[in-house]
Structure formats: C-alpha cells, structure tokens
Image (cartoon, rainbow, N blue to C red):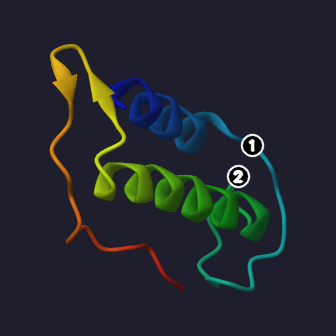
Amino acid sequence: MELHLVVLATILGITHVIGKNTVCENEIPGFDDDMRISIWNKHNDYRSALARGEVKMKNGSARQASKMRELVR
C-alpha cells in the first residue's frame, strides 16, 4: 500500500501532460481531467480494498477502514 502511495505521488509530481480541465478548472500544468479521474479511480480502488480488510501488510492484514471517505467530484 505504501508503495502505491509513493507511485501516485510521483506521478502527480512528474507528469507533464497538457489538457483542458473541465472537472476542476484550476489550470495546473501537467494535470488534466483524464489524469484527475484516473487518480480518483485508483484512490477509490485502494480505499475500497482497505475498507474491506483486503490489504496485506508485512505482519498480516491492515485494519479495516470502513469509515474512510471516497473521493468524489
């Protein structure tokens, strides 16, 4: 799980895609709607797995996080 968060942060920091932003109109270079939606979906996939107690750690499974909020638009 930690590795996934590092990868996600890295993608946010180094992506250089220019596109039109309609979901969030703040013009951030390298951060377009496709990337934003992709990150939402990936975050919610990880959140869902954690909420169900499916995330494995070194010493067993991570605790369930059923109250973790889903990212929404």
Tell me which amino acid carries mark 2. Gly
**Circles 2 and 1: CB distance less than 8 Å?**
yes
Q: What is the number of the mark on residue 66?
A: none
> How many other residues sit within 10 Å of disc 2, few (<14), some (14-19) or many (≥20)?
some
Work out which quarter of the rendered image holds the N terminus and state it: top left
Q: Residue at x 39, y 73 (%)?
A: 70
What is the spatial separation of the Cα atoms under label 2 and label 1, in whole angstroms? 4 Å
Taking 44 as reference, is 15 left or right? right
Query: Where 27 falls versus 50 (above or below)?
Result: below
Q: Which residue was labeled with disc 2? A: 30
Q: Could you tell me residue 27's position as x and y percent? A: 65, 73
Q: Which residue was labeled with disc 1? A: 16
In which quarter of the view is residue 56 placed?
top left
In depth, the one of 53 and 1 nearer the eye is 53
Q: Secondary structure at mark 1?
A: loop
Q: Secondary structure at mark 2?
A: loop
Q: Could you tell me residue 44's position as x and y percent? A: 49, 62
In depth, the one of 55 and 43 nearer the eye is 55
Tell me which amino acid carries mark 1. His
Taking 12 as reference, is 27 left or right? right
For this orientation, the residue located farthest to the right is: 19
Work out which quarter of the rendered image holds the C terminus and state it: bottom right
Q: Could you tell me residue 16's position as x and y percent? A: 74, 43
Query: Where 15 falls versus 27 (above or below)?
Result: above
In which quarter of the view is residue 33 placed?
bottom right
